[in-house]
Amino acid sequence: MPILHIQLNAKGNNVQGHLIEVPPSIVLQRQGPFVKVTIGLAQSIASQLLQQGQTLPSPVSGIALIDTGASTTCVDDSVAQQMQLPVVNVVNIASASHASTKQNVYPIQIEVIGLPISIETPNAIGAALGAQGLIALIGRDVLQHCTLFYNGITGSFTLSI
């Protein structure tokens, strides 16, 4: 079972403008548990395209937030469009801050950098995540196959798949 353990670190300016270390517990509380990932086309769709002699979209790397509040994994819509991922469905989604809207669904594969596995996510919902510096939210559809230990005191988390 691959295990990824991360303790977050950051620097910031104090009130005098001096650069200081920010305690890991504060970093985790403010930024949440995030991992570096690479988003690609789901292998099931990629195989079909290769058999047809088509070129696969180039993968995109960035930050994904592990989000226990998201029932389904999401991918940034602009990333999905940049990659020209096929739309496999359209669904209605609502959040705590937004009314129900129609969103595209994309077949993606997520590689968590540091873990030797790929996670097939055939129904990732498109969402506007770029403004938050994210390319994906890892939702409970993926987390149901994982163990996640969130240690707020030490500012660390452990993800095993």
Image: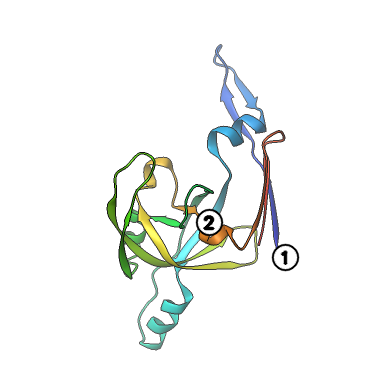
Q: Where 154 sits versus 66, above or below?
A: above
Q: Specify the quadrant that holds the N terminus.
A: bottom right
The residue that mark 1 highlights is 1
As helix, strand or loop, the secondary structure at mark 1 comes to loop
Please provide percent x and percent y for residue 33: 58, 44
Would residue 127 appear left or right of 17 to someone viewing this image?
left
CA distance separating discs 1 and 2: 19 Å
Crowd around label 2: few <14 · some 14–19 · many ≥20 (10 Å): some
CB within 8 Å, label 1 to label 2: no
Residue at the image position 50 percent from the left and 47 percent from the top: 69
Marks 1 and 2, the one that precedes in the sequence:
1
Please provide percent x and percent y for residue 56: 40, 74
The residue that mark 2 highlights is 140
Residue at the extreme left of the image, as rendered: 102
Question: Disc 1 vs disc 2: which is toward the camera?
Answer: 2
Name the residue type under label 2: Arg
Q: Specify the quadrant that holds the C terminus.
A: bottom right
Would residue 69 appear left or right of 8 to someone viewing this image?
left
Please provide percent x and percent y for residue 105: 35, 64
Crowd around label 1: few <14 · some 14–19 · many ≥20 (10 Å): few
Residue at the image position 66 percent from the left and 28 percent from the top: 23
Residue at the extreme bottom of the image, as rendered: 51
